[in-house]
Image: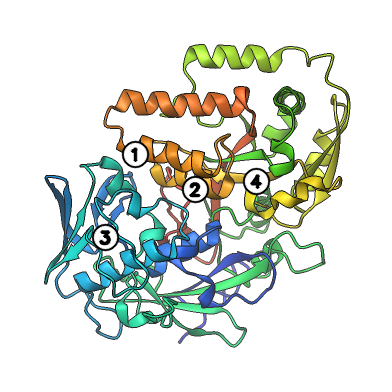
Amino acid sequence: MLVFLSTTHGFAMSSTDTIRIAIPSYQTDIVKIESFDPAKINWTEEWNICMNIYSRLISFDRDENIISGIASKFYWVGNDAYFEIRKDFKTVDGYTITPEDVAISLKRLIILASNTDGKLGSYLRDAGQLDKITDDCEGISFDQNKIIIKTKGKNSFLFKTITTADFSIIPKKSLDLKTLKIINYRNTTGLYYFDSYSKDGHIILKTNKNHWQYSETIPQVVELVPYIYGSKERVETVEEKFLKNKIDMISRFSIPLEELFKIKSKLDEKKIKNDLNQSNPVLLFFFGFTHKGFSLEKNLKFAILQDITSLMRKHQSYLESTKREVTDSSIFPFNGHGGLTPEMNKDYQEKKNAPINENIKKQTINIAVSTVSKPMFEKIMKGGHFDYNLIDYGSIKAFNDFPENDSKDKDAPHLFFSNQDIMFEEDIGLLSYAFSISSFFHLKGKDADKWLDTFKIEQDTKKRMDMIKQLHFDSLVSNTSIIPLYMSRAGSIGINGWKPDFPLYTADTLFWYIKKED
């Protein structure tokens, strides 16, 4: 293989078909392929890798249209969803993917019950009691060329649900059918498969040329270069790796957009050719209430929202200078499907902007923040009605990181800093994730499950929209469970001729949207 030394770019070019992409790690600079299981996705990087190494029955194109995946055709017959499986689709070692592989993957999800982007069993006419993979499931059947999902009623959400990474199809031969663990990451259904580890311990992915999306124009080899995100210790940052030419691309949401633009400026100053790609504003950053915080009096929780959103407005110019787009303090975009009605928004804004109730005493509110975000909040969270104690938790956290029994600990956080992809267009996967992981709606546990089940079976679009708008309003005003802070765009930057061309409407880093310029 030839190695070209570039005098105009200032970097030694990497292999023409190998791209080195940064991947965040929260604990160690060694990431194992076994970390990635579609049934156990909690974080963006897990989602992204599963999207690349596995395929689903159906998928979305870059314009958010549902298209064929492993299923070449999909349609409804009464209340049953039919999926005709592609003929002769093989893994890298020649294993043909069959309807049985699909059925086993779907049954595995039901048995494990650990995925976060929608529960298949809630759609089925009869899921039965599945204890092991060999048990019959009346709601899932298959023959030689198709699989049938028998539902309670024709439901448009089913197709959207099974496009998510959770519903990735894993070949039967790659599973231990007793433990349900993935035992083979070479034979996958995705455009990429696990090949090996580099001498530095990095995951090496290669293309499966048997995949229907395969093209010679996409990266043929992907090396995942981990970096420790939000470390309290001094470690080599992703920026340092990038500027030292140890990686070719910083993927979406690896670092704040502000830092990405600073890197671009440094590259431009050195006349190093680079390509920066941005999405629409798709990521909401927010403070969620922990168990401890959510148990506070309702009027106190809303007063905290009033105080913090006021501080955000005071620092709007600063925030926007750092590529953070201050919202109108609502969860979903005003023009999105989940946006508040004009009447709700007027009521909310009037209540939010009113003086804080004089009976609300000044007190200390503990907030768990990430190492990266702490300096920003130290600048913003001063001069409010409450005293804010910022606690460095390293990385961004989720609701379940703060156990209920912490509520009695006076030093435990009342709030946690987090984020979620929130471009809500009736996306049942995002809603399910918001209930299960982010848990920023006021409904929790069984109440949340009941709401989701009702939402999914409601056939009237207006009634569904009324449900989500009311949930939105109540989670802000009636029983405050979230404090929206700002929106951000997903950004990615490439060098050495690698150009990210990711879609506008998603935060995903899908490797087949990366191109190599001549």
Quadrant where the image shows the N terminus: bottom left
Name the amino acid type tagged 1: Lys
Quadrant where the image shows the C terminus: bottom left
Whole-Å distance between the Cαs marked 2 and 1?
14 Å
Name the amino acid type tagged 2: Tyr
Q: Nearer the viewer, residue 353 or 129?
A: 129
What SS does tag 3 mark? loop
Mark 1 vs mark 4: in front: 1
Name the amino acid type tagged 3: Leu
Mark 3 vs mark 2: in front: 2
Q: Which residue is mark 4?
A: 418
Residue 55 picture location, percent across and down: 33, 65
Which circle's residue, 4 or 2, is located before the other in the chain? 4
Residue at the image point whose x is 29% and y is 47% from the top: 158
Q: Number of numbered discs present?
A: 4
Looking at the image, residue 513 sits to the left or right of residue 233; the answer is left
Q: State the mark number for residue 433.
A: 2
